[in-house]
Image (tube, rainbow, N blue to C red):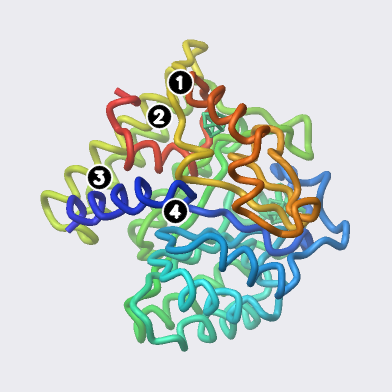
Amino acid sequence: MLGTDILAWKKLAREKHKPVHVILFITDHCNAKCGTCFYWQNLNQGESLKPDHIDKISDALGELVWLDISGGEPFLRKDIDAICHRFIENNRVRFINIPTNAIQTSVIERSVQGILSNRKNFRLNIALSIDGIGENHDRVRGVPGNYAKALATMDAMRRIREQDERLSLSLVTTVMRHNIEDVKKLLALGASEWKLDYHSLNILRGQPMDPALQAPTPEQFAEVSKLQLQLCRQYFRGRWGALGGWTAVMGRFLLNRYYMREMEGHPRDISCNAGDVSCVIDANGDVYFCELLKPIGNLKTYDWDFDRLWHDFEATQLRAKVQNGCHCTHECFHTKNLIFTPWRLV
Ligand code: SF4
Ligand code: SF4
């Protein structure tokens, strides 16, 4: 039950005084050159979290609800299954989400099977990034043939999902001024032919590698978010039943309306939960409340002691600032705002 789950997550967050949602960049290595990438300046610098550092982070974090394994391309780490197992066993994590450029089909297939070989009760979502149809996608990603490879990876994930219902499959599409028509086609394909469990839309954010790319106009975003909302009824009802599904659709509506205000130039400051329930740990040890703010410090200078860094002066000051009012369109954090403090988005 969605409502009961949310109450349990809130209780855990209240008791812990530490994040229940962590975005962990396990490597800065990537095999794509996406024009949309907001992390491009940090890519391929040879940084990755070492297993003993991951162990220390895991030990410090305690129980978790959500873990996003990110990068770089996370599936370039051969030990990604062992990393997930560590958090499943040590942190009792409920939901693991792994976004991927979906280029290396067989590697991803093997790794996903490896992660699911742990029989504990968790859910794994593989989020394939697709930003356009066919060559349009390949151009944005800077990788010829990326679209065909992503479809092959999608097939492989669907095959595994048939055998293991803990796996779900979603698409994440970056919405830009130039790809609106493709976004509409992708949304339709995702719900009908591709049998996805969800399709998430990210508004182009940060400083993308290709400075010519632009965020959509408010009118364009309104058009695709309306379509997304219609499909959410189908996605959410299947997952949470009639009442839970209706609640989740209302949540999606609130979020999209919040983003619309931002895009129309009337941003609304909210007291954001990033820095309270969520955090980001970079492959180089930097810790952020969210990737859009400066880091609160680097774990290397704290001898990998997450607790000390999380409660240190710099973090306390920034937390007060963020809780006084902040705004953006970063989906990862606003979905948590929606779960923990939905009234702030109304
Ligand atoms: S967006 Fe992801 S896949 Fe693309 S270059 Fe950046 S890290 Fe790599
Ligand atoms: S509102 Fe956005 S920029 Fe501000 S703390 Fe939250 S996620 Fe970060």
Looking at the image, the residue that sits furthest to the left is 242
3D distance between C-alphas at marks 3 and 2 = 20 Å
Question: What residue lies at 36% left-to-right and 50% top-to-bottom?
Answer: 15
3D distance between C-alphas at marks 1 and 4 = 35 Å
Q: Which residue is mark 2?
A: 223
Of the residues tagged 3 and 1, which is closer to the observer? Answer: 3
Q: Quadrant of residue 247?
A: top left
Amino acid beneath label 4: Val
| Residue 143 rendering spot, x and y as whole percentages | 76, 59
Instruction: Check residue 20 in the rendering and tell me which mark sits there, or answer none.
Output: 4
Comes first in the chain, label 3 or label 2 = 2
3D distance between C-alphas at marks 3 and 4 = 20 Å
**Nearer-the-camera pick, 169 or 58:** 58
Q: Rate crowding at label 3 as few (under 14), some (14 to 19) or many (20 or more) other CA atoms within 10 Å.
A: many
Q: Which residue is mark 1?
A: 219
Q: Are marks 2 and 1 in contact (CB under 8 Å)?
A: yes
Q: Are marks 4 and 2 in contact (CB under 8 Å)?
A: no
Left-right relation of 239 to 276: left
Question: What residue lies at 62% left-to-right and 63% top-to-bottom?
Answer: 57
3D distance between C-alphas at marks 2 and 1 = 6 Å
Question: What residue lies at 18% left-to-right and 50% top-to-bottom?
Answer: 3
